[in-house]
Amino acid sequence: VQLVESGGGLVQPGGSTRLSCAASASEFRWATVGWYRQAPGGGRYVVASINNSGTSTYYEDSVKGRFAISRDNAKNTVYLQMNSLKVEDTGVYYCGALEQWGQGTQVTVSS
């Protein structure tokens, strides 16, 4: 399966953006999917994840109440709505599922 992220870019502090992760294969709809952040010079860690049916989600403490993960299995797509963005949210965001990674999309929060 191939994963393709889109969205992100340059956002002002307090602003919002939405990331999308589109998958090439239908088995994506049966997989738990995670969004991961890699800050400059740092490691990659999960910020949110969602189970196959969308009934269970996980959020890393720093994004709780600000980010929302969702999925549309008919479109083989998972989303990450990012609100009240902070400078420390800056990084490359990767979608991960079925032991595959997307190419990543840059989110830069800066005034």
Image: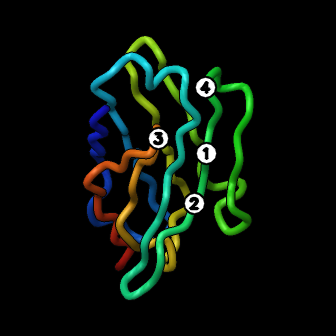
Disc assigned to residue 46: 2
Q: Front-most of 3 and 107?
A: 3
Earlier sequence position, callout 2 versus callout 4: 2
Q: Tell me whether circle 2 and circle 4 mark residues in contact (CB < 8 Å).
A: no
**Badge 2 element:** strand
Between the residue at mark 3 and the residue at mark 1, the CA separation in whole angstroms equals 10 Å
- What residue sits 35% from the left and 66% below the top? 92
- What residue sits 29% from the left and 57% below the top? 105
Between the residue at mark 3 and the residue at mark 2, the CA separation in whole angstroms equals 12 Å
**Colour scheme:** rainbow
Disc 1 target residue: 49
Determine which quarter of the picture holds residue 49: top right
Q: Front-most of 81 and 100?
A: 100
Disc 4 target residue: 52
**Badge 4 element:** loop
How many numbered discs, if any?
Answer: 4
Q: Residue 19, position in %: x, y?
A: 38, 45
Quadrant where the N terminus sits is: top left
